[in-house]
Amino acid sequence: MSEPQEITPIDKSDLVGIAAGLFAEGYRFVQVSCVTLESSYELTYSFDKHYRLKNLRVIAGPEEEIPSISVIFPNAFLYENEIHDLFGLTIRNMAVDYRGTLYRTTIRTPFSIGKVKIPVPPQPKAPTQEEKPATATVSSTINEPQGGS
Amino acid sequence: MNTIQEMFQSWGMVERAVAFILLAPLAGGLIAGIDRRVSARFQGRYGPPVLQPFYDVFKLMQKQRILVNKFQNFNILLFLLFTVFSGALFFMGVDLLLTIFSLALAGTFFVLAGFCVGSPFSHLGAEREIIQQVAYEPMVILLAVGMYQVTGSFKVAEIAQFQAPLILYLPGVFAGFLYILTIKFRKSPFDLSMSHHAHQEIVRGMTTEFSGPALAVIEIAHWYENVMLLGMVYLFFGFNPWLGLGVALLTYLFEIFIDMNYARFKWQLTFGSSWLFTAVAGVSNIIVLGLMR
Amino acid sequence: MAHRNLIPFGPQHPVLPEPIHFDLVTEDEKIVDAIPSISYVHRGLESLVEKRDFIDYVHVADRICGLCSFMHSMGYCQAVEEIMGVEVPERALYLRTIWAELSRLHSHIFWLGVAADAFGFESLFMQALRLREPVLDIFEETTGGRVILGASKVGGVRRDIDADSLAGIVKRLAKLRPELEELSTVFITDYSVKHRLCGVGYISKEDAYILGCVGPMARASGLDMDMRVIGYSAYKYLDVQPMVETAGDCYARCLVRIREMLHSIDLVREAIGKIPDGPVEVKVKGFPNGEYMSRIEQPRGEVIHYAKGNGSRFLQRFRVRVPTFSNIPAMIRILKGSEIADVPNIILTLDPCISCTER
């Protein structure tokens, strides 16, 4: 029933190379989503081919620059601008750079670290959100049914 | 009807002009009101009261006068003036050609009014209006030429009193004139430069930058213009006043019907098709008339 | 004559009653460049996950958009249910599918009307909106809402539809069908409509793929891409056929939507024929811990609801990737080189939904 979704953690320096490989394989760029962690950001690049999603995960610190993949996938520029405007991350070499004017929010970069209240799990045994991406070093499906926590 | 016609003919030129200036807005507004009502019925709505165009114009008159620049007002007033002038000439029964040319002049002032503001929508609308004028003007002139060929006179009064049915001599010209009437009435598919609904890529085209009294002036000028154009339709049936009046109103209904059944054309097709139609219907009719003589 | 004009298109424009803005650089009537900008009404709904727990947030998700409101709450619920491993009862899945297809139907009819308005065919616009009413009435009678349905919840649906009403829906849609066919005939055959749509706004299959087109936009260019094929909800039990056209112009997009509209009626009928009895919801225990990207097919294309929870009552992150956002690059590509008279048609055949985009 559920769609299998693999997430491959990669290093940000490999991003462009892997994306180019996926482009050559005929993948379509679907989206980038970004999650604010306690002291870093977690970017998920999704690609699709024949209804199968393939996700690449990049962890970036607030000061780090992320290479743009809009040279390879021309439609990526919107997502990258979005991440720049909402999360305050710097993305290098965007095909179209809005320079922070795509989302003219009253609060600048509303999702950046410090502005987002990360929810606290009710029980101490639940892992903190910082550990989670660190543990996911091998590609795995993310459909973990969660017991009664 | 005949008594009305006789009374009209017994009047002097000045009286006729005054009658036109006073009565045409009433008739034009009423026609516009009926138009909105009938259009609404075609679309399955009820539509506004028949007098709504008058309410609209009175309301517009009361609005604050905001002008983008002074040329705007100047051009718009000249537009009204020349429309009224050409209409008055027409109903005074003088030269048809003069009427047509002064109407074209009025249109030119309207285009200038569109050009004199800064809005790109207005500019685009004005550009399209010029294209439309180029599209319809040949047919209007052919109308005068055709009528001259049959009646031997450019005088409206003489054409109107011509006893043979003009329509039998000029069916092609009449058809061509019907075609370009859609442009003149600013009805779909030819409402390129400014549509009635402002649901257009260029907002409301030339009139985008007009508001309040200036817009009311444009509205009134259109009423004058419409009455005059229907008067031209009447000329084809001058031999029988009742028939003429009936056909003029039917023509308007027909235009509403066309309006309801078409999407807006692009300017290329508008221009091409009206010239083609002018050539096929109008010019051939004139040539045949020439050969018959 | 190559005088360049800058024409502002939106955020307030009568053809496009949605707050998106284009700067169209034109030479006469030809567009040489188009620069989009959005975020006129950014509402920060994604940020609201901080304040509303994952159960309450369904209502916020419902309000992301007016036309595909149900699809958003459905996608959200699906994502949360996947994370939590909730087995949603079959009947609830079917009901969701029925409402989703009805949403698609009413969205497409509405689209046809608005498209007709864009090319200046007012009577067609009125007729289309009139035909949309029966669908809205069905919504009102089955959920209580005409636009925002609020029928979906985590673990199932909020309301059941009894057998009589289901039969009534089929009957009403059967009555609606010939009227819709009559309406679509005008779109398919009318000369002036074809004049405005055929060959306008062409995008090739390759471009559509690379630029990330989704939904009817992609299908009109010959891409066989319909997320319903994945088989979420009850679609796995139904005979879903992606409607694919190859011409890639506005006319093809129009045809795709017309065919989808009629297909939706078939799907609703099929779903109502197959719907099993049983409960419509299960009790949900615990809090979401994990992440999932739920993909569903909206009227406008693939939408992705990404939810990430860390075991607390509030989601850590909820993100919606809406189809309009994905179609904007293609929209820019098409706009370049087109004529100003075609702009409304091009923009509307993409069916932009800015209220989705400005979530």
Image: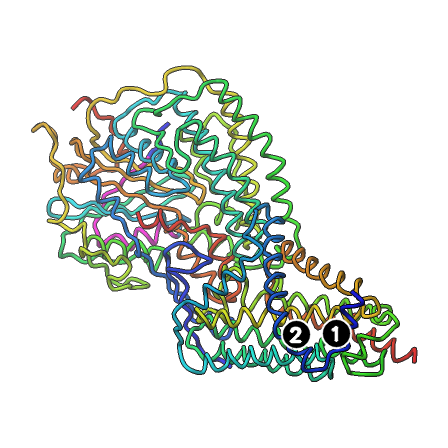
Residue in front for this viewpoint, B246 or B145: B246
Dominant SS of magenta comes to helix
Residue in front for this viewpoint, B110 or C42: B110
Check the image and name the residue furthest to the top.
Answer: C278
Type of amino acid under label 1: Phe
**Which span is picked out in magenta?**
A5-23
Above or below, C41 relative to C343: above
Which disc, if any, is residue B19? 2
Chain of residue at mark 2: B
Which residue is tagged 1?
B8
Q: Secondary structure at mark 2?
A: helix
Marks 2 and 1 in Cβ contact (< 8 Å): yes
Please indicate whether residue A79 sits to the left or right of residue B249 in the image. Answer: left
Residue at 18% across / 51% down in the picture? A110
Please indicate whether residue C14 sits to the left or right of residue C128 in the image. Answer: left
Above or below, B33 relative to C170: below
Above or below, A107 relative to B158: above
Type of amino acid under label 2: Ala
Residue at 42% across / 82% down in the picture? B70
Badge 1 local density, few (<14 within 10 Å), some, or many (20+)? some
Badge 2 local density, few (<14 within 10 Å), some, or many (20+)? some
Residue in front for this viewpoint, C189 or C160: C160
Q: Which is nearer the N-term, disc 2 or disc 1? A: 1
The x and y percentages for residue C271 are 49, 25
The x and y percentages for residue A29 are 36, 49
Residue in front for this viewpoint, C276 or B41: B41
Check the image and name the residue furthest to the left.
Answer: A124
Marks 2 and 1: same chain? Answer: yes
Q: Which quarter of the picture shows residue C14?
A: bottom left
Chain of residue at mark 1: B
